[in-house]
Structure formats: C-alpha cells, structure tokens
Amino acid sequence: MTVTYQFPENFWWGSAASATQTEGSNNGVKGKDIWDQWFATEPNRFFEGVGPGVTSDFYNRYKEDIKNMKEIGHNTFRMSISWARLIPGGRGDVNQEAVTFYNQVIDELLANDIEPFVNLFHFDMPFELQELGGWENREVINDYVNYARTAFDLFGDRIKTWFTFNEPIVPVEGGYLYDFHYPNIVDAKRAIQVAYHTMIAHAKAVEAYHKDYNGKIGIVLNLTPSYPRSQNPADLKASHICDLFFNRSFLDPAVKGEYPEDLIKLLEEHGHLPVTEPGDQHLLKANTVDLLGVNYYQPRRVKAKDSLPNPYSPFMPDWFFDNYEMPGRKMNPYRGWEIYEKGIYDIMMNLKQSYGNIESFISENGMGVQNEERFLNNGRIEDDYRIDFIKEHLKWLHKAIEEGCNVKGYHLWTFMDNWSWMNAYKNRYGFFSVDLKTQTRTAKKSASWFAEVSQQNGFND
Ligand code: BGP
C-alpha cells in the first residue's frame, strides 16, 4: 500500500554546512583558527593527513554550489561565518574582504530564493583567543558578543534566522574530555567551565540580537536520546544522568533559561560546579531562544556501570554509566554510528511535552559513507542507502508533525561532500560528490530524489 507523506506548507527543505569544512582556509584573507593551528602541528591526527586548507573551495565556487542548491529544490540553507575570517585574531578590525565574500554568498542565495540561516560558531575558535584560554576565559565572551554584534550589523538586514552555536557540547567533549579537538585537554572541571561560558556567551548574543533586531535567533544542539538498556532502576538512573550531561546541559538553559536541578546537585557533590557571576542566572532566564535547531545522527544507549570507576582516573561523565551495545542494532558501519530513525520522533515528542513545543527543525541528519565511488553508475553515485536513510527519518518526523510537534523543516548534513574535522574526507555525506583533485561537483541519486521531495513537499512510499 502506498502512503503519502505530505509536509506542512512552507516546510524548509535544505542542507547545512560550516565555514571551516567548506570555504578552504587558504583562500582569501583569514586569521588562524584552532583547526589551522592543530593541523599545522599534528597533521598525522587527520585522516590521510588532509587539513582544512582547501576543503571544498566554496570560497571560489559558491555561485556554482548555490545554483546546484536551487536545482535540487533548496528553499533554505544553513551556513556559518568563520569568526577568524571576519575578524582575524578574533578581536579588532573587520576584514573587508570577508565582508565582501559573505555579502556575495548571502545575496546569491537570496537571488536564488534560498533563505540563508546563519550560524556564528561551528567549532572554530580563533587561535589567538584560544591562546588566551578560549571559552575558559570569561573575557573571550565579550569578544564573541562583539563578533556577533558585528555580524548582525553587517548582515542582519537580510539574515532573519540566526544561530549562536552549532553543537556547543562537541568542543567541550572534543577539546576538554575525549581528545578529538584542539586543545586536547582532559579535565572535566575545565570542560564544565567551557560549557558554562559558552552558554553565557550564547545568552549575551541572544540579548544583543533581540535588543536591535526582530528576526529569530536560536541555537543548534545535537540531541541524542539516552535510551536505557532496561527499565531496571539502575539503568534508568544511568540514562537520566547521561541525559543531564549530554542533552540537558545545553537544552534546558537554552529553552527554559535554567540548568536542571539534578545536574547542579551532581556537580556540586563532586566539587565540579563552574565559577559563575552574579547576574548570570537572570541573563539566562531572560534570553531563551526563539528557535531550536536539532542535529540528530544516532541514539545513545546506556546501562548501569559494570564496575566502579578507577578512583585514580580523572572525573568523567562516564563515571555514571556504561555505553550499551543493543544486540541487533542497525549500524552505519563506516561512521560507526547506530541508525535509529524513531529517535527523531522521540526528540520531537520530548520537545513538545517538556519544552513548551518550541519551534524547531532538523538542522542536521545524514549518513557518512566511505568509498562511495563503489556505487558509481554511469558517472553518478547511486546512493540508495542515503535515500532510505532520509526517507525513514522523514516518516518519523512526519508522524511527529501529525501529533502536533512544532517542527518546521529538514536539513541534510550536508550539501556536498566536505571536510569532516579529524575524519577529513573519510566519510562522504553530500547530495553532491566532490572530486578532490578537480573539485568537480556531481549530483548523486539522492540529489534528484530530494529535488522531487522538495517540489512535491513530501513523497509517497
Ligand atoms: C556534526 C557536525 C558537522 C559534521 C557532522 C558529521 O556533529 O555539526 O560539522 O561534521 O557532525 O560528523 P563527522 O564529520 O564527525 O562524520
């Protein structure tokens, strides 16, 4: 039986990308960010020794890329501004060449009826500010707010949808807990301070935006439902703590303007509360988001710990839970992530039930696959697995909408194959493949499929 999945009018069909992953840091005038620095000092940490210098050369090819976006029915596209490009060094003078570049990209998108959503920070701290301590240093918050204000003033006449941060927990995990981002520190106390200051920077940017502009401003969070192995109270407790650390540490202050009591209690018990200032609480409460971007790739499955943590090992969120490998789980073996489509529905229902049904959209969802050339047929990659992946997620999203969730769109990660941090070009995610030698873009099968979905505002299956 064929079922029709029709989406609400004006649904946002598009994709997301980030500056560091697409522009090419060797292009144009640009200050150094932590990725340039890390790659210069430890190139071996990056898959096949490929760094952020060229990436997809969007800096020079944005016109062709935007034309392709238009062709596959994008009505929206999320990009990010590189702080180190707009303001080399992170503070001081604005780089006029960057202003021209971002103006051209924005104008080109608008001329093609694609609404640009702009994100201000996607893992890319200017190196000079990292040298001052990055988010550990409260002064850096002022630099960020100045940068945000500069961006609002330069582009706010045309940009009506802004995001302060993409996945702010990732630099915390990568840079301060699990060693997959610069500055490669392993120290939960510092990690928690970084997380807290990021949230304060976020709230101050929201405040600055609302003061002078009347578009929408939000945050993009990677919400990863924490499914317990069982209903055993010990497993439930493990999943609750996991949820506090990895979802609610940003979701609650962003949407409700306050941190969960249980999280505060737990950090207090372990002597890990961050340093705060008077006025912070009020700032958070008064500056909640207008809109939430939800990145969803994989669920988290957890169980109670099998053994007590080594008391000599550093304090970690993992002191409170073990990861659980559910037998029979469906996997994306290339990225090593479980595929669980219903997760998208569970997230949305949770936002509806516990977060005032805040306006949201899927700001990233996607499937990274290695060696996609295997699927080449007559010059194009036949990525039926990606079509299935998107379709199955969209079905659950559709159900959430039918049940009243306030979700406004779906963006794939990502528009074209791009540079993925330490994984560089290992896993490909795009609607368009990119030949790294020639920079030629070629539409994959999923691109044509998505064009139809967008045109029909839905699909039959
Ligand atoms: C998200 C990030 C993106 C992107 C994506 C794919 O967490 O916002 O920047 O990279 O994940 O993941 P990865 O690049 O690790 O394969």
Image (cartoon, rainbow, N blue to C red):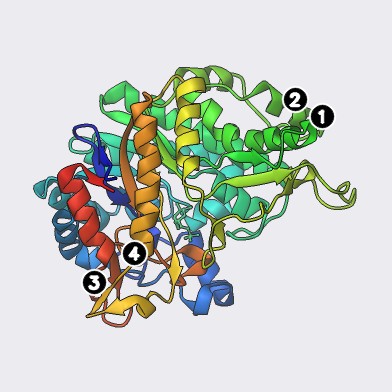
Instruction: Tell me where residue 233 sits by quadrant.
Output: top right
Residue linked to disc 2 = 265
Residue 48 percent coordinates (x, y): 51, 79
The residue nearer to you, when weighing 75 against 205, is 75
Marks 2,1: beta carbons within 8 A: yes
Q: Amino acid at mark 1?
A: Glu
Distance of label 4 from label 3 (alpha carbons):
19 Å
Decide if residue 180 is in sight here. Answer: yes
Numbered mark located on residue 384 in the image: 4
* Residue at 19% from the left image edge and 32% from the top image edge: 9
In the orientation shown, which residue stands out farthest toward the front?
1
Separation of residues labelled 3 and 1 (CA atoms): 53 Å
Q: Is mark 1 within 8 Å of ligand 1?
A: no
Q: Is residue 358 left or right of residue 169?
A: left
Q: Mark 3, mark 1: which one is toward the viewer?
A: 3
Q: Is residue 246 visible?
A: no
Q: Quadrant of residue 430?
A: bottom left
The numbered mark, 1 or 4, whose residue comes first in the sequence reads 1
Look at the numbered disc 1 and give the secondary structure of its residue. Answer: helix
- Mark 2 or 4, nearer chain start: 2
Residue 202 spot, x, y in % from top left: 46, 34
Name the residue type under label 2.
Answer: Lys
Q: Are marks 3 and 1 in contact (CB under 8 Å)?
A: no
